[in-house]
Amino acid sequence: MKRIKRLLTVSALSAGLLVSPFHAHDAHAKVWWNGMELVQGQIGKLTVLKDTELYKLQGEKKVYIKTLKAGGVYRIYTFKPGMLGLGGGYYVDRDARVKYETPSKAKLNQVKMEQLFRGVKLGMSASQVKKLETAKFITQENIDGGQAWVYSTSLFGYHTLLVYGFENGKLAFYGYSFDAGKEYTNDQLTAIYNNLKQQLITLFGNQYEQSDSGQGYPPALVFHKDGLVIALSYDADGLAVTVTSEQ
């Protein structure tokens, strides 16, 4: 684990000045729900039953943008009292002119699972990973006899750097480094750790291993699934989520 954390930290720090805004829809297996692709951050679906106004919120003031026509279908990302959010600060009134549906928790968790694992498998060749990954490529480095590829992406709503580690041309691990670009404060990293912990417990259950860093940081957590080890750790080497093999 320490070696992987060092690889994540060194690789990501070298890319820190090159980080660009992440793209919301990186490559992963699509999750379908009621004829629509369910994406990360989406909480529901809106069907317009009768023409309804689309507003842009400026503070608490609603500014009319256009009229959405009956039959239109839109993703919903947030809500406020009496309103449904289409993203980007755009809202419609939640009334009889629209139909709002929400996916099951199982579907929402499936989206998170696909985002975490990205459709890649340990042991894949570098060319196979490259073909699957569409996040913003940052840099490639030779470290400790292997290679590390660094991408800019997001995980569970947080910007992060994604690092793929290859040994002998095969994918040996991959992980997410949340503080390499020094864009988060210590308080923010602690909040991210707590949120990631709850997200991982939701996905993998309460059966996990825990170890204290002894440095005043939150404990490292290790989850197991289908021969994989998913670890959340926050210590002097940084905050990271890593995926490795049980072997």
Image (cartoon, helix red, strand yellow):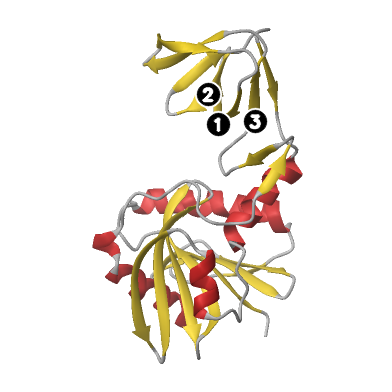
In the image, residue 217 sits, relative to residue 70, either above or below, namely below
In the image, residue 107 sits, relative to residue 220, either above or below, namely above
Q: Is residue 213 visible?
A: no
Tell me where residue 172 sits by quadrant.
Answer: bottom right
SS for callout 3: strand
Q: Is residue 241 left or right of residue 142?
A: right
Q: In the image, what residue occupies the spot 40% across and 48% down?
A: 188
As drawn, the residue found furthest toward the left would be 17
Q: Is residue 242 visible?
A: yes
CB within 8 Å, label 2 to label 3: no
The amino acid marked with disc number 3 is: Gly
Q: Which residue is mark 1?
A: 77
Residue 44 disc label: 3
CB within 8 Å, label 1 to label 2: yes
Residue 50's spot in the image, x, y percent?
A: 64, 8
Q: Residues within 10 Å of mark 1 (few under 14, many from 20)?
A: some
In the image, residue 183 sits, relative to residue 62, either above or below, namely below
Q: In the image, what residue occupies the spot 59% across and 8% down?
A: 51
SS for callout 2: strand
- Between 154 and 7, the one lying in front of the other is 154
